[in-house]
Image (spheres, coloured by chain):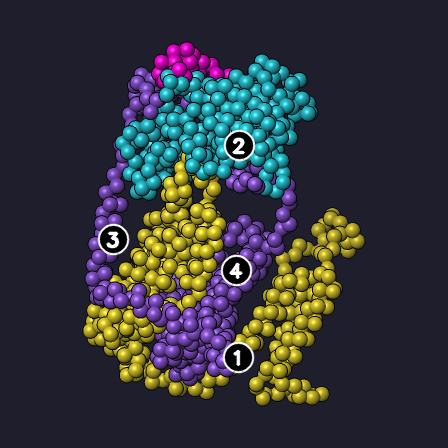
């Protein structure tokens, strides 16, 4: 897209378009910077050549070059040239080169190819067949599991969001008693957030015993709680960092203690955002509980897991359709509530 | 009432906020501090309630020496010293009444604040404070739904709810249009007279300072360079503070004078008996006996 | 309470009501009626009932919770011991495996994000009300809602695993497809939030739709779009673990294998690797996002404390002593 909106070359009566000697030039990026970028490009091309596992080659007359590294190199050089032509600074170009490099690294690491799309499409046929013929009756047969899933989401959201709010308040320098506490809780929140929900699922199922041991929902709720704490603490923490400090100063000036200051000056400011995040987390929980069920944490996911092992795709299809409906309904509900909150 | 003895303030970056300030402010005075931006007006005001800790010298408020390192003592001090801000500093999402009740914090236990269950007596004080500034009918409105002048009056009510001995006002009218600014200053002045609350106000505009102050303090570069009754604050004296000749902006910042005078004329008969009568509120003597 | 005042005093304080008629002491005496909180209280009550009903519906066995602390302590000790055990060749291999599997998860997440990003920009424009005619907008919005409602694993099970086989590629593509939903929605919201001024002026200058997008919309939204992509990358790293449990490779496959045999020491090692790598990537990503949105860090002027006297910010200084 190189379209430009330009004025006509010279407006009648205006100054001649060519006499631009005194017009400011768009500053050129530093040449040394671009030489450095060129070096990065060369290194990346070498990296491409070294990690390429494809045997496809391209005959370009003078010789044969490996296809994929050649394409990668072309992209790198194109970015470099385009950057120079548009006089972009070195940093954005470095970013673009890095994106190409990392994408190559990821793509070659996981053996990226799209050829199965036209070679092996037929293999998806039986699965799609099942999915296209959902077993509607199955939806009602598993209504108990649905209720459990929803109940798990309600309990986990409530508990997780309460703890998450507490941790967010303790972590933000705005509302925290001192920097020591704030730093510690901040680190704790990062750790909690870094473990994926499935990790917590596996952990609590292993510790409590899963569906087989009758503790599936308990483990599922605990896993969701940890998952929710991580999200709420992060999102609410960002809101707290951004509150208007004026009311805090006013509360300080009227002799309020820390708890009172947080309650009267911080909480009212973050409440709408916090409630809206909590509803968002509730939506996430319904989806996440499906995943957790697969590792034995109860709810509808357990049913999916069983049906999956039986290759009963028509049953899974029915559950999925119901899932989409439930998620859309919750989505709509929370949107309505959020609208009323603000 | 408030005594600065050789008080220095040095900010963490090493920037001096106040230099060797010596001041003595008597109970019930209405003091206006003038000076250019960066002269240390805000610092001076914020030192009094410990929002800015002083680094050397002695600051006495009432009969207590302020100790910026003691949180407990600071809270006790701040419960006696109310503060009004340029940007009102109200919590915009909660009701006016809840905002005023923030002023009762120091007299309320933490758990009551936490649950929002204020005592009936505290609510009564909050209502009376709102009545005193004349916007009690807005008590259950959201603070954000009020105009700037109304918000600043809610902020004054919040301070009154503290039942303070001193009111500090940091550029209380800088965000308001001139007629509203005059009303807010009149409120402050009236409260100062009625309740005998020592009031210290930062003002940009010399005009307003001369009109409302008992005493004017001029600051420059963190030092007090002028201190005298309002009559002594002549143009020449203030030019000394500003170190430049006064401009039209300094003395006549406001809307057309006619509006100004109309307000004054309208308020005159109303205000007169109030000041003289003084029976509507606890007199300074009563307060002193506390 | 020393400044209680008799009713007579209030009528005089009417000097400055700048709304409504002046001199209306009666109205000032009348305190407003407290608004009813019935709706709020009913809502809270309903929520309380819902919460208790939910607890009983989960069928969670709370007696289990009694042994939980002991179990937790026990297993945590095993994991910590695993992390701090001497570095024999086997332990070293465990660390290396965990690390390389984590990197594979990162690769899956990255490719998934790139695939999602490529589709999300055009989809974002199609789902923005100020860019697209209503019928098309409604259709695209609905498709996006459905994509967002379906969990990643469904794409993996239904489409990707059969075609691409059990492996990281299937995982990456499943992540990519499911990323499209959220990414496009967030991007469309960013586009809807653009300043209409430049749009209007370019339309007034006779620009085509494409020109408008290139010169009036993209410059405004691109920083935000990049931030959204990076944020999704962080989310995808966690989501890739989910697909791993199904056998799509990466850290999820390793974790699920280790939990199957309850190898607590190696679980500990793996969790440490997950935490460290995730936090590092989050930090880098947060830094880039901040940089993209707020630009290069400005040089701090040392005398910035001077600003305090203008009253435009709290001075929460601490004593230097």
* Colour that chain C carries in the picture: purple
Q: Position of residue C124 (x, y in %)?
A: 47, 63
Q: CA distance from mark 1 to mark 2?
A: 62 Å
Q: CA distance from mark 3 to mark 4?
A: 36 Å
Crowdedness of circle 4 by 10 Å Cα count: few (<14), some, many (20+)?
A: some
Q: Specify the quadrant that holds the N terminus of chain C.
A: top left
Neighbours of disc 1 within 10 Å: few (<14), some (14-19), many (20+):
many
Report the span colored magenta: B260-285
Residue A44 visible to the viewer: yes
Residue C146 placement: quadrant: bottom left
Colour yellow belongs to chain:
A
Residue linked to disc 3? C47
Q: How many marks?
A: 4
Task: Provide the secondary structure element on which disc 4 rests.
Answer: helix
- Image point (57%, 15%), residue name: B229
Q: Is residue B268 magenta?
A: yes
Residue C253 placement: quadrant: bottom left
- Residue A32 locus on image (x, y percent): 74, 65
Q: CA distance from mark 2 to mark 3?
A: 47 Å
- Image quarter (top left, top right, bottom left or bottom right) of the C terminus of chain C: top right
Do the dots labelled 2 and 3 sit on one chain? no
Classify C47 as above or below C4: below
Mark 3–mark 4 contact, CB under 8 Å?
no
Dot 3: within a 10 Å radius of its alpha carbon, few (fewer than 14), some, or many (20 or more) residues? some
Instruction: State the mark number for residue A109.
Output: 1
In percent of width and height, residue C2 lies at 34, 22
Question: In the displayed structure, does residue C151 sit left or right of residue B189?
Answer: left
Q: Name the one closer to the observer, B267 or B131.
A: B131
Q: Is residue C30 magenta?
A: no
**What kind of secondary structure does the magenta stretch mostly adopt?**
helix
The residue under the point 62% across, 85% down is: A66
């Amino acid at each position: 897209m190189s379209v430009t909106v330009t004025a006509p070359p010279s407006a009648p009566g205006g100054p001649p378009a060519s006499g631009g000697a005194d017009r400011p030039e768009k500053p050129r990026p530093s040449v040394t910077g671009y030489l450095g970028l060129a070096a990065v490009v060369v290194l990346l091309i070498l990296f491409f050549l070294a990690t390429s596992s494809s045997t496809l080659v391209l005959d370009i007359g003078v010789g044969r070059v490996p296809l994929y590294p050649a394409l990668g190199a072309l992209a790198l050089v194109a970015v470099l040239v385009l950057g120079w032509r548009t006089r972009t600074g070195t940093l954005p170009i470095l970013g673009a080169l890095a994106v190409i490099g990392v994408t190559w690294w990821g793509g070659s690491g996981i053996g990226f190819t799209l050829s199965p799309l036209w070679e092996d499409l037929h293999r998806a046929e039986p699965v799609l067949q099942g999915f296209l013929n959902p077993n509607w009756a199955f939806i009602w047969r598993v209504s108990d599991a649905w209720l459990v899933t929803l109940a798990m989401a309600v309990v986990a959201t409530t508990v997780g969001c309460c703890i998450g709010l507490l941790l967010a308040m303790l972590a933000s320098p705005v509302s925290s008693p001192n920097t020591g506490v704030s730093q510690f809780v901040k680190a704790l929140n990062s750790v909690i957030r870094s473990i994926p929900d499935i990790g917590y699922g596996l952990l609590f199922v292993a510790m409590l015993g899963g569906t087989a041991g009758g503790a599936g929902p308990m483990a599922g709720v605990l896993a969701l709680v940890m998952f929710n704490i991580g999200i709420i603490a992060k999102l609410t923490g960002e809101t707290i960092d951004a509150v208007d400090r004026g009311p805090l100063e006013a509360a300080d000036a009227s002799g309020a203690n820390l708890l009172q200051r947080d309650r009267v000056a911080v909480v009212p400011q973050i409440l709408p955002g916090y409630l809206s995040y909590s509803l968002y987390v509730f939506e996430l929980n319904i989806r996440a509980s499906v995943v957790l069920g697969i590792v034995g944490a109860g709810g509808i996911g357990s049913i999916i897991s069983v049906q999956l092992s039986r290759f009963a795709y028509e049953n899974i299809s029915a559950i999925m359709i119901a899932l989409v409906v439930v998620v859309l309904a919750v989505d709509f509900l929370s949107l309505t509530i959020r609208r009323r909150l603000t | 009432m408030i005594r600065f003895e050789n008080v220095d303030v040095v900010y963490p970056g090493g920037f001096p906020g106040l230099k060797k300030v010596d001041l003595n402010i008597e109970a019930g005075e209405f003091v206006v501090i003038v000076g250019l931006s960066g002269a240390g007006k805000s610092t001076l005001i914020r030192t009094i309630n410990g929002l800015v800790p002083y680094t050397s010298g002695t600051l006495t408020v009432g009969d207590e020496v302020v100790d910026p390192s003691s949180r407990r003592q600071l809270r006790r001090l701040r419960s006696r010293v109310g503060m009004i801000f340029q940007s009102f500093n109200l919590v915009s999402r909660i009701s006016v009444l809840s905002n005023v009740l923030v002023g009762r914090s120091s007299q309320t236990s933490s758990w009551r604040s936490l649950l929002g269950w204020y005592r009936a007596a505290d609510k009564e004080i909050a209502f009376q404070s709102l009545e005193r500034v004349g916007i009690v009918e807005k008590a259950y409105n959201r603070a954000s739904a009020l105009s700037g002048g109304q918000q600043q009056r809610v902020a004054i009510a919040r301070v009154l709810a503290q039942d303070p001995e001193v009111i500090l006002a940091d550029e209380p009218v800088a965000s308001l249009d001139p007629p509203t600014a005059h009303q807010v200053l009149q409120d402050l002045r009236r409260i100062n007279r009625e309740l005998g609350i020592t009031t210290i106000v930062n003002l940009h505009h010399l005009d307003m300072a001369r009109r409302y102050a008992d005493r004017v303090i001029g600051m420059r570069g963190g030092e007090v360079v002028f201190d005298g009754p309002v009559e002594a604050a002549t143009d020449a004296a203030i030019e000394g503070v500003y170190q430049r000749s006064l401009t039209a902006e300094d003395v006549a910042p406001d809307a057309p004078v006619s509006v100004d005078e109309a307000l004054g004329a309208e308020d005159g008969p109303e205000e007169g008996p109030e000041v003289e009568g003084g029976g509507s509120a606890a007199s300074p003597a009563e307060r002193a006996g506390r | 309470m020393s400044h209680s005042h008799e009713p007579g005093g209030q009528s005089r304080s009417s000097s400055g009501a700048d709304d409504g008629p002046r001199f209306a002491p009666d109205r000032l005496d009348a305190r407003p009626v407290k608004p009813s909180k019935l709706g709020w209280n009913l809502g809270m009550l309903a929520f309380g009932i819902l919460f208790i009903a939910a607890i009983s519906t989960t069928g969670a066995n709370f007696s289990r919770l009694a042994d939980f602390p002991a179990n937790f302590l026990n297993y945590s000790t095993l994991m910590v011991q695993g992390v701090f055990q001497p570095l024999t060749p086997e332990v070293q291999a465990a660390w290396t495996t965990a690390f390389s599997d984590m990197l594979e998860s990162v690769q899956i997440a990255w490719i998934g994000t790139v695939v999602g990003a490529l589709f999300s920009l055009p989809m974002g424009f199609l789902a923005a009300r100020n860019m697209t005619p209503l019928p098309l907008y409604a259709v695209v919005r609905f498709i996006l809602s459905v994509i967002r409602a379906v969990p990643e694993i469904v794409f993996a099970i239904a489409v990707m695993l059969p075609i691409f086989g059990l492996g990281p590629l299937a995982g990456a593509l499943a992540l990519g497809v499911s990323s499209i939903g959220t990414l496009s929605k967030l991007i469309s919201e960013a586009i809807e939030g653009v300043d209409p001024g430049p749009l209007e002026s370019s339309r007034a200058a006779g620009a085509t739709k494409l020109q408008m997008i290139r010169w009036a919309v993209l410059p405004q939204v691109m920083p935000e779009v990049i931030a959204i992509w990076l944020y999704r990358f962080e989310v995808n790293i966690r989501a890739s673990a989910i697909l791993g449990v199904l056998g799509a490779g990466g850290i999820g496959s390793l974790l699920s294998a280790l939990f199957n045999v309850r190898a607590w020491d190696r679980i500990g090692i793996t969790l440490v690797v997950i935490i460290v790598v995730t936090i590092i990537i989050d930090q880098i990503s947060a830094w880039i996002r901040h940089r993209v949105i707020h630009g290069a860090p400005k040089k701090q002027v040392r005398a910035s404390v001077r600003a305090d006297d203008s009253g435009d910010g709290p001075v929460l200084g601490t004593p230097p002593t």
